[in-house]
Amino acid sequence: MLICVPDVLSKVEVADFRAAMDAADWEDGRSTAGAQSAKVKKNEQLPPNSDIARQLGEAVVRALVANPLFVSAAIPKQIFPPLFNRYGVGQHFGVHVDNAVRGDHLSGARIRTDLSVTLFLSEPEEYDGGELIVEDYYGSHRVKLPAGHLVLYPATSLHAVTEVTRGVRVASFFWLQSMVRDGHARSLIFDLDTAIQGLVQRVGRDDPELVKLTGIYHNLIRCWAEV
């Protein structure tokens, strides 16, 4: 399941992020890569434990938990502190799969990486190349979203970032552990929730059949959730 979530950050918020990031010191992006990923990774990132990375990451998490579409699609249990990277001309990230477990050095928290997230902080016209490529059973998907939008996709997927040939691609990237571990179950719950929200607009929340469907939604989460 690959889901795009629009307007997680406003354009004003993106501009504030970019100003803070432009004034910060950056490091080699391989510092947080696993052994396999480090061989194909060529980019820069904000030092994960730096004050600016932590402050911006906390702002991202606040925006995420306030976004109904994100919460519906991810059913998040724990969100890894967001990281921030940039790709200049000639930089890229070859095909790889994310680590199954990520640990945060400051908090000591460890999460199972059910979903990977990329939050775009550059407008598409600011750079050429730099598409996120996600491979699944249905083929390869190329993702390049407006600044402030994000994409959710299974962390089990092979994925890559193509070489930037003009400009700079800036993004936040991170992972989360969902309360619903099984991806198929999570997809069914999301489809049901989406249908319910569509019906709410048509018939209102008090419709008896809609109340039953809402009960089914919560009972499915009750059945599958790990809390």
Image (spheres, grey):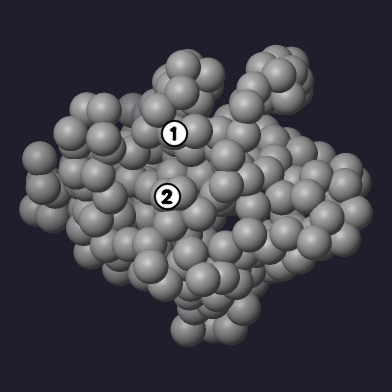
Rendered location of residue 174, percent (x, y): 44, 44
Identify residue for label 1: 48
- Which quadrant is the C terminus positioned in? top left
Rendered location of residue 209, percent (x, y): 29, 44
User: Does residue 1 appear anywhere in the picture?
Assistant: no
Rendered location of residue 133, percent (x, y): 63, 69
User: Between residues 44 and 103, which one lies in front from this camera angle?
Assistant: 44
Residue at point 30% right, 57% down? Answer: 114
Residue at point 42% right, 72% down? Answer: 36
Where residue 132 sits, quadrant-wise, is: bottom right
- Which quadrant is the N terminus positioned in? bottom left
Comes first in the chain, label 1 or label 2: 2
Rendered location of residue 98, percent (x, y): 39, 63
Identify residue for label 2: 32
Near mark 2 (Cα within 10 A), the count class, few <14, some 14-19 or many ≥20, is few
The span from disc 1 to disc 2 (Cα, nearest Å) is: 8 Å
Residue type highlighted by circle 1? Pro
